[in-house]
Image: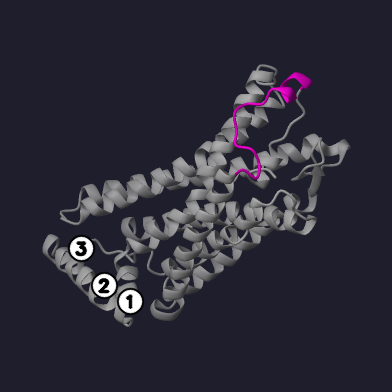
Amino acid sequence: MNTSEYEANSEYDYNDTCEEERGPELPDGSTVLVVLYYILFCLSLLGNTTVLWVLLRYIRLKTMTDVCLLNLALSDLIMAITLPLWAYTYPTLASCKLMTGAYQLSFYSGTLFVTLMSVDRYLAIVHAVAAMRARTLRYGITASITIWVISIVMALPGVTFASLEMDEDDISSECQPLYPEESQRFWKLLRNFSENTVGLFVCLPIMIFCYVKILVVLSKSRNAKKDRAVKLIFTIVCVFVVCWVPYNVTVFLQTLQLFMDILDTCKASKTINSAVHVAEILALTHCCLNPVIYAFVGEKFRKSLGKVLTRYPCWSHQSRTAFSLRDTTDRETSNTPVKSDY
């Protein structure tokens, strides 16, 4: 089976020579891919379930920030629970549609929630007073419901056309879209255009704008804690760019193949096809990194997690010492910390 449903979506009709000589890639069902799937599954499951547990039981949902963090964890968890299915070379139609829907739903919702958190952080720092009414729990819930509805609608075509196709030797089956012949070009363009619009042309510029404005405000702040905030912001943008921009670029190149003869060659096809494999693996790692970026480095979440761990004897001494030392350091490095919900 292909590395992901997106990889299956990337299949175009190339000439016979190109089919005979593929670019370098990991074979479906290989030990490396299977191990990678399960590592990502375990890390994402552990991180995101911990975020959900602490948020719902100890922090409670009080602000837009909490709602965004909860939904981002849910989005990553949806992706994580389907990863073990990708290790099998004989998927069923039901599992094929499940993987397709989960991947696309996670892609759209995760990207939109990352963008919403960027806007929320922008409002909290750049327009702290004016935005107090806009960053309430009610608006957070409304925005989250809207994002989930949009993500489900955009993921529906992929689920609808997902199907199984046996390989030439009937050894394994592949999960890939089966579009009607008369409208195949339209659905391919719609899929690629939707992904690029959300991930590359809308959300990424919004994130860059928000964080540039935040950096401008922080640069004028006389705060010893400013350097940590700048590093966190830089990490958020860099991780998103490294994980998702390569995938969106390969999707964009696939779109150009439908219009430009210069890219519709055997060599270009093999290069893009190989790049898709690497880009998809990078994209998968984002669901493991989100809990670290948005939760575990946040002061409020860190303190709540520390209180939880102190209830267990095996963790009480280590966690109490670590968190008390971190809090002491925070107090010493800044008397006027940057106000943030993270």
- Residue 85 visible? The answer is yes
Which region shows up in magenta? Answer: 15-30
On residue 337, the disc is: 3
Q: Distance between the residues labelled 2 and 3?
A: 23 Å
Q: Identify the mark at residue 218; answer none if there is no mark.
A: none
Q: How far apart are marks 3 and 1 (CA)?
A: 25 Å
| Residue 68 in sight from this viewpoint | no
Could you classify mark 3 by the number of other residues whose Cα lies within 10 Å: few (under 14), some (14-19), or many (20 or more)?
some
Q: In this view, does 65 lie to the left or right of 32?
A: left
Task: Name the element at disc 2.
Answer: helix
Looking at the picture, how far across and down is residue 41, in whole percent? Answer: 53, 58
Q: Do the residues labelled 1 and 2 touch (CB within 8 Å)?
A: yes
Q: Which of 23 and 79 is in front in this view?
A: 23
Label 2: which residue?
A: 319
Evaluate if marks 3 and 1 touch, with contact meaning CB atoms under 8 Å apart. no
**Which residue is drawn at the image coordinates 39% and 43% (left, top)?**
238
Q: Where is residue 113 in the image (x, y as percent from the top left)?
A: 51, 58
The C terminus is located in which quarter? Answer: bottom left
Label whose residue precedes the other's in the sequence (3 or 1):
1
Q: Does the magenta stretch include residue 122?
A: no
Whether residue 165 is situated above or below residue 272 in the rendered picture: below
> Which residue is located at x 33 percent, y 50 percent?
233
Displayed quadrant of residue 11 = top right
Residue 321 screen position, x and y as percent: 20, 72
**x 71%, y 58%: residue:** 98
The residue that mark 1 highlights is 309
Give left or right: position of 208 versus 157. left
Is residue 19 part of the magenta span, yes or no?
Answer: yes
Single out the mark in the foreground, 3 or 1: 1
Amino acid carrying mark 1 in the image: Leu
